[in-house]
Image (cartoon, rainbow, N blue to C red):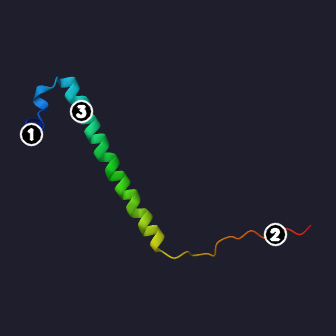
Amino acid sequence: MYILVTALYMLKPWVRTIFNSILISVAGMAHIMAILHYFEMVHKSYPRLSAPVTAVPMEL
């Protein structure tokens, strides 16, 4: 059904393989980016456990 709907049946087998590889790669990268974005949002919502380090001026 996937081949019929996307008209991949008209392509040569090696071109179809490249097309499917690119499609799977893009879908995989989108999922990874969504997961990273989710964990970034979760990480920002938690309060910090320690105070931020501040620079102390040195006396000369």
Q: Position of residue 37 (x, y in %)?
A: 40, 60
Quadrant of the snapshot with the C terminus: bottom right
Amino acid type for the residue under numbered disc 1: Val
- Relative to 25, say whether 39 is above or below: below
Q: Which mark is residue 5?
A: 1
Residue corresponding to mark 2: 57
For label 3, the residue is 19
Q: Residue visible at 61% across and 75% down?
A: 50
Q: Secondary structure at mark 3?
A: helix
Would residue 55 be found to the left or right of residue 44 on screen? right
Q: Quadrant of residue 4?
A: top left
Horizontal side of residue 46 vs 19, given as left or right: right
- The spot of residue 58 in percent (x, y) is 85, 68
Looking at the image, which residue is at 20% across and 29% down? Answer: 16
Q: Could you tell me how many numbered marks the image carries?
A: 3
In the image, residue 31 above or below residue 55: above
2 and 3 marks in contact (CB < 8 Å): no
User: Neighbour class for label 3 at 10 Å: few (<14), some, many (≥20)?
Assistant: some
Q: Amino acid at mark 2?
A: Pro
